[in-house]
Image: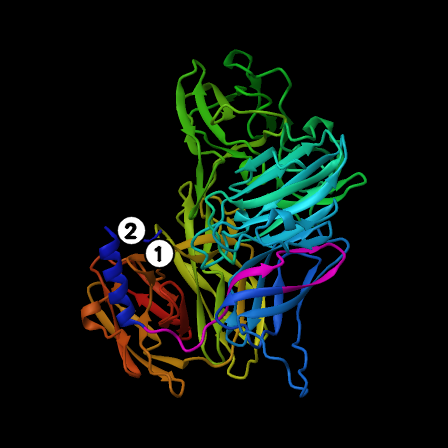
Amino acid sequence: MPNQLAGPALLAGCLLAWASSTAVAQQSYPMLMSIEPIAAQIGQTSRHTIRSRYSTEGTYRVLVSGDGVTGEVVQPEADAEGEPAKQSPQALAVHFTVSEDALPGVRDVRVATPTGVSTVAQLVIARDPVTTETADSDPAAATPFTIPATLCGAIEKPEDVDSYRFTATAGQSVCFLVRCMTLQDRIHDLQRHADPILTLRHPTGSTLATSDNVFGADPFLCHTFSEDGEYTLELRDVRYQGNEFWQYAIEVSQRPHVQTIFPLAFTPDQTIATVAPLGPSGAGFSSTGLAPATLHLPDLPTEGIQTARLDLDGQGASSVQVVIDPGPLLTEIDDAGDSPETAQPISLPAGIQGRIGHNGDLDYYAFDAKQGEIHTFEIFARRINSPLDSHLRLLDADGKQLQLNDDLRDGKRTSSDSRIEGWVVPADGRYLLEVRDLNLRGGEEFVYFLKASPATPHFRLYADTDKTLLTPGTAGVIFVRAERKQGFDGEIRLEVTGLPPGATATDGRILAGTHTDGCIVIIADPAAGPDVANVEIRGYAEPTAADPASPAPSAVAMVYQEIYQPGGGRGHWPVQDHAVAICQPGDILAVRVSPSEVHLKPGESVTLDVELERAPGFDKNVLLEVPYKHLNSVFGDPLPQGVTIDAAASNTLLTGGATKGKITLKAAPDATLAERQPFAVMANVSINFVMKATYATPPLYLNVAP
């Protein structure tokens, strides 16, 4: 995360100084803020408005994650003179078509324009008809609807209270699921999020029930009505704040809400399974009262968390998260393992399907291990929508704590799941694993999957950012960061697949040892036209000399979108895809560097001469960079360790239309040796305090030799 400054005055001063050294680009890709209405119904085509910062003019494609949902731009109608009616460049009309077999849930949406592919917005795919809120904070004019329904609106201004009225009968049980705050994490420039609260009112106006903060800050409520009548549903921000982009969807139905399933894990060869659907306990529909359901597993499963289709008898399909694991898979034995003395015996490796069945429940598993073995123990629960906030302890046979983990961290995000990684067995003997909820909660839906496996050298990859924008004849850079695990110190080869026509990539590399960063340089053909595609970024290692028969580790990069934080900081949120787009010519038409291959020896310096070809009329400031930086933080640096930019000998800020600069690379006496390590020089034009329009050179190569 970016370093925090000491105080508001210092922060304001730094931002003012930085703003004076940069300039806003003449053109920018769209930054999506909301979709109105934010839900689309399965089996229907519906019209929506996508609102953005910066123009969506010329949008030629709408990208929606997953299967079964497509988007198409609505062309403006002609006016009386036959000319297309004018519309706001920041409000794009789109038709979303949702197929009958599309899974309900939340999808990422982007639009592609001549100036680039947008940031991410989110769309709810719902089963039931969409009703749009029409009342203006007036309970007497509450928007009517009939159950089932998907209610869409916005908490659009301070003190806004959206009201809906409906008829219910005695004995009728109804669930109300709100999606609002949880839809806003991926919005790049929505710096304050909604905190909605839901209120159900009796025909007399008295409060029957309220809900707040069930799924994140979003409410969920189930209620069984005791008498016939016309009832009112109200939604507002708990602080009485508002924002025109705080869109929401309230899914109202008599179906139980399926939060997760049991069991949670399946082997790669399974295609179908019978599972128990689980929902929030005490919510009108008992978890234990749901009939078994059929789970259809992915056709091409890979190990880890995957999305599967759950068919509920007579109630349609749901999407659920599952774990694909080679096993062997075991199930917790009922009424066993509630104490160290009665711990359920297991043999490693193993995957255990378990449940914290009641408040205060503790699960124990006993295993034998030999001195020097290395094991990893990992809980999958919150990441696959179980409410369990796991707390994992490793004990010796006498109950003495050896290891503990509450929250694990992958990359830039923390999860409420737990992981004890790379534990070295101190002596032959019997050991215990203890699983509980951090706050000693429990229930039928508090399920988990505990994976116990040998710890092997491997790595995880993270891509920064979620989009690469090219213009004809120029290049772009994808920065990839590795987390090295269990002593893995090998070289990682980086590649990207699925590029749009007209774009080619040169494989990147993360150097061996303790290096963590590398980059992939993508070039657009000078004759390439506008196009966009979602790509996959993957890293490969070579088999080790010590064990050449073992599979070499590989990983697909998790993709981060950059998030504009209050005060100008740069945050990150995972999104589903990295998009590569070829755009129209921009502010910089070419970035040329000489030499294209650099040879350094430890202690030496080499200067790169950089020349820009500016677009006619573009005379704003341009900043030349090699590492990817923001304020005081480095987010990607493909240079070998010990090779840095000599700022005093460089000219990286090109002002007043200047076209020539220079970057001096300096190798420390102990710099890492490298052969043809790829990198690029970026010419960055500021869009806002966080986002930059980047134009890069074709791949350059750095050699550091003795």
Give the labeled residue for mark 1.
Answer: 569
First along the sequence among labels 1 and 2: 2
Disc 2: CA contacts within 10 A as few (<14), some (14-19) or many (>=20): few
Tell me where residue 54 appears, x and y as whole percent: 48, 71
Tell me where residue 361 appears, x and y as whole percent: 54, 19
Tag of residue 4: 2
Tag 2: residue type? Gln
Q: Residue at x 22, y 69 (%)?
A: 605
Tag 1: residue type? Gly
Is 72 covered by the magenta stretch?
no
Q: Please say whether residue 55 is visible from this viewpoint.
A: yes
Tell me where residue 526 appears, x and y as whole percent: 50, 83
Q: Which span is picked out in magenta?
A: 23-48
Q: Is residue 440 above or below residue 478?
A: above
- Front residue of 304 and 167: 167
Q: Is residue 448 above or below residue 473?
A: above
Discs 1, 2 touching: Cβ within 8 Å? yes
